[in-house]
Image: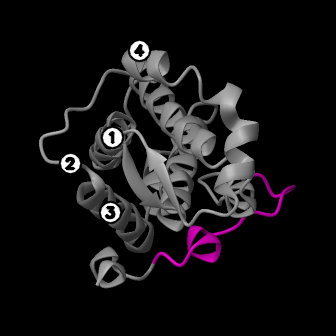
Amino acid sequence: MVLVDKQDLIRIFACCRQAQMSVHRILPFGDVWREFQQFYSERRRGLLNNCLEQLGMLLPPETAAPSREQVERTARWLPFTSRLRSVVNGRRPRLAVSADHLAYIDAALKQFRSFLDQPQKPNTHEIIAMRTELYTCQWLTRAYLAGDKAADAAQHVEHFNQSDYRQHVAIDEIVPLLEEPAKRSA
């Protein structure tokens, strides 16, 4: 287990949620790949890179990322303990998170960063696979944050091709993300 600041975990959740919802919104629409890449502007990519940098600092050396099946098997208990976790975590600034889960999230977000750089829209199977990986990441982080109001707000993070019928929140409005991780740890 790795102790993670709650704000860092909320930041990671928001990045995973934004990526998952954005990839999800590519599927039903035609040729929107360029618009999708433009949505992930320099600022949003910088926030994603900050999340990856933070994950890199949290992970113990040489922690290998498990497969999605392994993560799902080890994380089965998370939903059942969420009510207890929400009571306990409400007062804790740092949360104990599985190093394997963090390694999985780190690998999936790195895969997403590479996904963004593809010159052409990936095929439907690749998009669905990416969405599934990101959904698992956001589900994992959300399970650790049960009952947290900032994580509740992050459920409605802005994303590509979002609906105008709901108010969405920018990641940096949920948790100050523009601050470099190295400065916060000093």
Residue 8 visible to an observer of this rendering: yes
The residue under the point 61% across, 44% down is 142
- Which of marks 1 and 3 precedes in the sequence? 3
Which disc is residue 99 wearing? 1
Circles 1 and 4, Cβ within 8 Å, touching? The answer is: no
Residue that numbered label 4 is attached to: 69
Q: Which residue is mark 3?
A: 54
Choose between 129 and 15: the one closer to the eye: 15
> Residues under labels 2 and 1: Cα distance?
7 Å
Question: What is the secondary structure assignment of the residue under circle 4?
Answer: helix
**Residue under pointer 2:** 60
**Disc 2 and disc 1 in contact, CB within 8 angstroms:** yes
Residue 74 in the image, given as x and y percentages of width and height: 45, 21
Q: Please name whichever residue, 17 or 39, is drawn nearer the observer in this view of the structure.
A: 17
**Which residue is painted at 44% across and 30% down in the image?**
133
Is the C terminus in the top left, top right, bottom left or bottom right quadrant?
bottom left
Secondary structure at badge 2 equals loop
Q: Label 1: state its secondary structure.
A: helix
Sequence-wise, which precedes: disc 1 or disc 4?
A: 4
**Dot 4 amino acid type:** Glu
Please tell me whether the stretch drawn in magenta is mainly helix, strand or loop. loop
Q: Which mark is residue 39?
A: none
Q: Earlier in the sequence, mark 3 or mark 4?
A: 3
Cα distance, mark 3 to mark 1? Answer: 13 Å
User: In the image, is 113 to the left or to the right of 89?
Assistant: left
Q: Indicate which disc, 2 or 1, sits on the residue closer to the N terminus.
A: 2
Q: Is residue 61 above or below residue 14?
A: above
Query: Circles 3 and 1: CB distance less than 8 Å?
Result: no
